[in-house]
Amino acid sequence: MSANPLQPEHERYARVERVRLGGVPVEVEWMPYGVGAAEQVAPAATTAPATPTSATAATAPTMPAVPTSIEPPEIVAGYGLLELEYAAFRRGAAVMDMAHRGTIAVRGADRVDFLNRMVTQELKDMANGDVRAGFWLNRKGRIEADLLFVHVPDVDGMPPLTLVDVDIHDAARTVATLHSFLFAEDVQITDESALWGRLAVHGPEGAALLSNAGVEDAALEALNHDARCVSCTLAGAAAVLARRDQCGSPGVEIFLPREAVGRAWDALVSQHDAHDIGRRRARPAGWHAYNIARIEAGTPLHHVDFGPDNLPHETGILNARTSFKKGCYPGQEVVARMESLGKPKQRLVALRMTEDALPTSGSPVFERGADGEPGNPVGAITSSTLAPMLGAASVAFAMVRTAHSEPGTVLLVPAEGGRATATVQAGLRFLPERTEST
């Protein structure tokens, strides 16, 4: 496990915040992101990766044993300020170090056509500035990677570019397998995870934060809609910003040269409100706070809530990742057959507990018998949290058998030494629905 490139900045923030808050304990809590090849491979789809280190946090993902272009880094679990970190997602601006994300660069005149023939999403009509998400499958229709395609607007003097966001553990393997499908196309695919720095900003004040860090008004205007991207300047460095709302508030993924990521981080997190002396405009947020926000918003994660043993129909986000009007791609026959002829064996669902008891990742889910007692096991919890927007209700994602996945189905889950009654929700999102989603 490698040191995080922004470790000095995280530690400095903790020291400054400790003084600013009058001695309140502020410490950077580090956690490993995934496991090494010699330790463990990815678990089965209904097995959660690990037990969370906090009752309010989802798990650190367990990853398949694959080579990566850079050694997986430690990531920030939190700073000991969980309530403030979470509040930034809802009322301010949360800044995240995204060192756990990989970046694939695809260049060449045939890149869009080639990628369109490889993945579940329709890409052939992508225009400059478009952002779309799709799955990369193996020939058996199982999910090899969950990808975000960022079709970067043309910049004078630079070759056309599509950036692909992917879990850092999947980057090298995805590049290698995509390369195996190339024949004579004008396409260059490179794992550039070691070259790009990655940050993210979430929250209603994110646009103001980015503006103060040097992003032009025209670029911010272009990001008023979800699933758009822009080329711009951030803290004096060339950057690509991609709008992607994962946490129930506006979200922006930031790609910029690795050597500029520290300067950009400082430009974002050091802002204070001149009209409310001492109040931070933005707050760094760790994995635990992010998980609370993304679970509330109904955003499952690859390698946490579904994995390489799952089919797209099992993920709960099929329609956001898959087009049924496009031509062939690896695994397409399996996806089309599942859509037209049958149902998957299991599905990811959202559960809300009746009791004030939080099940942990990996807890089994049981059907409720006629006598109200647990019956047969039907699945497992994949992520869970106490949801502040729901009055601290216990909520979770779970992979369960399709026969028990209908909204309103009542299930039973072990939780905090007792038993919780869990009701399947309609859809994955716990927050009120928005008109746009990714």
Image: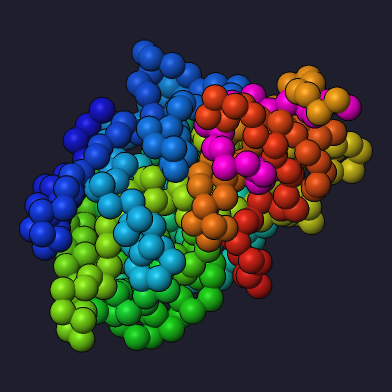
Query: Residue most toward the top?
Result: 38
Q: How many marks?
A: 0
- Is residue 287 toward the left or the right of residue 381 in the image? left
Task: Indicate left or right for 45 with 273 as reference.
Answer: right
Establish if 374 lies above or below 25. Answer: above
Residue closest to the eye, 406 or 112:
406
Q: Position of residue 402 (x, y in %)?
A: 81, 35
Examine the rendered structure and indicate whether residue 242 appears above or below residue 330: below
Residue 136 sits in quarter = top right
Q: Which residues are magenta?
A: 348-370
Residue shown at 43%/32% (left/top)?
Answer: 52
Towards the viewer: 236 or 107: 236
Residue at the image position 66 percent from the left and 66 percent from the top: 433
Where's residue 196, x and y in %?
Answer: 29, 52
Residue 137 visible (yes or no):
no
Of residues 245 and 263, the one nearer the viewer is: 245
Asked whether residue 358 is drawn in magenta, I would say: yes
- Quarter of the image with the N terminus is top left
What residue appears at the point 29 percent right and 46 percent down from the top-left corner? 78
Camera-nearest residue between 317 and 15: 15
Residue 333 forms part of the magenta stretch: no
The quarter in which the C terminus is drawn is bottom right
Query: Image height check: is 355 above or below 130?
Result: above
Residue pictured at 31% horizontal, 31% vertical: 32
Q: How is the image coloured?
A: rainbow
Query: Residue 413 falls in which quadrant of the image?
Result: top right
> In x, y percent, where is residue 5?
19, 44
Q: Quadrant of residue 161?
A: bottom left
